[in-house]
Image (cartoon, rainbow, N blue to C red):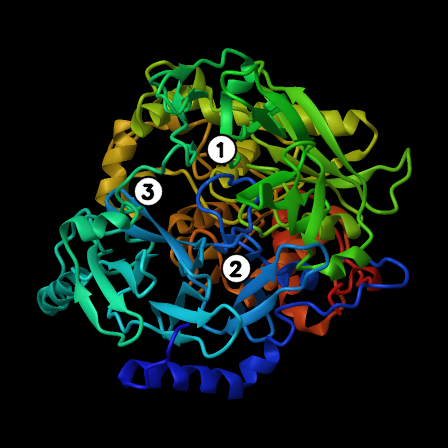
Amino acid sequence: MVRVALGKTGLFGACVMMLALSSPGWARCADLLPGAAQPTGPKRSITSLDLARLRDIGRPDGALLGGPSPLAVAPDQTRIAFNISRPDPASNSICVGLAVMDLVVGARPRLIDQGGEMILASGNVRGLITPIGYPAVITPSWSPDGRSIAYLRRDQGVTQLWAARAEGGMAHPLTQSPVDIEQFVWRADGKTLLYAARTGQLAERAADANAALTGYPYDDRFVPAMSPVPLPVATTPLSHYAVDIASLAVRPVRGDDSVELPPDRLNTPAPLPAAEAGDGRRAWTAHSSENILSPLRLQASLASGDPVACTVAACRGKLTGLWWMPQGGPLLFLRREGWDLGDLVLYRWQPGAGQPRAILRTSGVLDGCVLAQAQLVCLAESATVPRHIVRIDPRTGKSETLYVPNPDFGAIRFGKVQRLRWRNDRGLAVRGDLVLPPGHRPGMRHPLIVTTYWSSGFLRGATGNEYPIHVFAARGFAVLSLHRPPFVAEADANATDPDRLNAANTANWAERRSLHSAVMVGVQRVIDMGVADPARIGITGLSDGSSTVGFALINSRRFAAAAVSTCCLEPWMVNATFGPAFARSMRGQGWPAATADDRRFWAPGSLIQNAASIDTPLLMQLADREYLTAIDVYAALREQGKPVDLYVFPDEYHNKWQPAHRLAIYERNLDWFDYWLRDTVDSDPRKAAQYARWQRLRQEQGRAGGGQDRPAIQASTSARRMSR
C-alpha cells in the first residue's frame, strides 16, 4: 500500500486533490465515465457535439497502429488500468481520469484519480523537440504487488509522476520536477520508482533567457511559423532519478541503475514489433530490404536458440504486434493485409509445428493489445463503432466486448458504409470508405465530400479530426473517406533513409500525381455508381492531405468547394517559414531554392502561380503556429478575386487539440460545404457575419468571371446547427 507522507510534497498532493474535488470542473467531469443505463427509443442523427465530446482511451486515430499500449495489466492479470479522457467544448477543457477495471464481461471501470491536463505528444523534428498537438499515449504501471499504480499526470504545465491505490483512495504526486517527467519504471522491490526527465533543459532555458537580452542568433533552432523564439533541442539527454515511495526522497541514479528505464524515445528509432517468451523463445521483425518502407519479415527462435523459418506470405508484410502465449503456447501476431492493407488479421503460430493460421479477420482496427489470463485484450473500433475494449480468445478468434466508453453512440443512426477498391494511373491499389446519408435510396445523387490521407477504424473526422464524416452524411452529403495508396518511393531501392524517400516522392511531383490520380479515379467511381452529383463535389485535407487538395485545385476543375487544415507547398514555405534546417532538408530532396525562380518546377503544384485559374472556394482553418505558411497563398487568391476564407486558432499545433476549437471547426466545415454545395445557410443569428463574408466572396467571384454572381441564399431551417 502506498503511504501518503504529509511532508511538503504529500501535503501538496492532498491540496491538489481537495481543490479538484471542490472545483466546478469536478461537476463538469461527472460523466467522464458513462452511466450504466443503455440508450432506448428510436435512433437519432449524429451531431458535431457528439463527436466533439467523444470519450477516448489511447490515441484517437485508428490509422496509427503499434507502439505502446494504453492498457496496463495487473500482476494477477485480473484487472487493467487505463487513462480515459472526455473533451468539454463548453469550457474548452478536457476531463482526464485514471480508471481500473476487472477483466470480466459486464464490469464497469472505477476512477481512482481524476484531474490534470491532457498530455500532448512531441517529436524529434530535425533535432528539435516539436509539439504536434496529438494526445500522448500514457500507460499506467502497476506496482509488483498489485496494490498501487504509478502514472504520469500534468498540472500547471508540468508532467509529474503520481501514484494511487489500486482500490481507490488519495492519489498524490511523487515528484516536483521543474521539467516534464517522460519515463518511469517500478523497481522489483516495489518501494522505489525510477524516472527520467531532461533536467538539462534548465540550463538551455537559462542560456536562452540571457540571449533574449541581446537578441537570439537565427539558426537551426528557429521554426518561424511555430514560434518567435528558438525551440528546445532534442539532444538534451535524459537525467535519471529514483524516488522512494514512503519518504518521497529523490536521488540521482547512474550506470546500471538506469538501465531498467526504456530508451529515450526522442533519440531512438521506434522499435519494430518483437516479443520474448518466459522460456527463452524469441520472435522479432526486420525490414526485408534497405528501403525503410519495405515489408517486415517475421523471424523466430526456439528456447534452444535454434531459428525457425516461416516462408508463407503471412510472415511478411505490415506486422503491428507480437505476443507469446504462456506455458509454451503459440505466437500470436497481427498483420495488415488485403487491398491497400485494408484488413487486419490475427494469426496463431507454433514455431516448429506448422505454419501460421489466421483466426480473426476484420476491416476495422485492433490496437493496444495486451495479454491477460491467456487472452488478448485490445482496443477495437470499426467504421461506425467508436473505440471500445474487447477480449479475444486466441484459440478461436472469438471476440467479446468488455467495456464501451461511449454507449450513447448506440442510439445514433448511421448511414451505410461501403468499402470501395480501385487502382490509380500507376496501378497502385487504393481504397476508400463510402459513407451514405442515413436516408439514402438507390437512384439518389448527393453532393460528395472527399476526405484524404487515411481511412481506418471509426470514421470520426478524417486525419486530423476536423471533417466530421458521419455528421456530413447526416446533413445529406455522401462522403468518400480516402485511404492513400502505397508511397511511390516504396518501389525505389534507393529510399534507404527519409531524405532519399522524400526525394523519390518529390521527383516530377511523383507522389502528388499518384495521390491526385487516386482521388480522381475514386470520385469518378462514386459518380458512376449514381451516388455523387458531379457538379457538387468538395475535397478536404490536413498535412499531406492539404497538399493533395492544393494539387487537385490546380490540376482539375472537378471540385466545387474545398477546405484545408494546413497550407501550403510554396517557395516561401519550403525555404523560409519552417526555418533554415527545414529549408536545407527540402533542397536536399529536390525542391528549388528561394532564389531559383523556377516557374517550370512549380507550375503543377503552386497555388500562387496558378491563382488566376483557380475558381474553387477554399476554406482554411489553421493553427496560429502554422498560418504563416498560408498567408502568401491567401494574398494571391484574394488579389485575383478568388473565394478564399482564412481562420486562425490560437495556441494550436499541427493537430488541433482544444475542444472548443474542434467544435467550431466541425461546424464551420459543415456550414462551408452547405453554402457552396447545397445553397443552404444556418439561420442562427450568431453566424450572420460568417455568411456575410461568404456572400461577398461569391459576389467577387462572379465579378472576376470565375463563377456566377448568384443572389443571396435564403436561410433554411434544415441547416440549423445540429448540436442544438
Mark 2 lies on a secondary structure that is strand
Residue under the point 39% across and 21% down: 287
**Residue 28 screen position, x and y as percent:** 60, 78
Report the amino acid beneath label 1.
Leu
Work out whether 519 lies above or below 194: above
Q: Is residue 38 left or right of residue 209?
A: right
Give the residue number, with chain letter if any, for mark 1.
322
Circle number at residue 81: 2
Is 702 or 460 nearer to us in this picture? 460
Mark 3 lies on a secondary structure that is helix
Report the amino acid beneath label 2.
Ala
Q: Quadrant of the N terminus?
A: bottom left
Is 74 or 483 nearer to us in this picture? 74
Q: Which one is earlier in the sequence, the residue at label 1 or at label 2?
A: 2
Q: Are marks 1 and 2 in contact (CB under 8 Å)?
A: no
Q: Could one spot residue 423 in this view of the protein?
A: yes
Q: Nearer the viewer, mark 1 or mark 3?
A: 1
Work out whether 265 lies above or below 593: below
Image quadrant in which you'd find residue 108: bottom right
Residue under the point 87% across and 63% down: 40
- Disc 2: CA contacts within 10 A as few (<14), some (14-19) or many (>=20): many
Report the amino acid beneath label 3.
Trp
**Residue 183 screen position, x and y as percent:** 32, 56
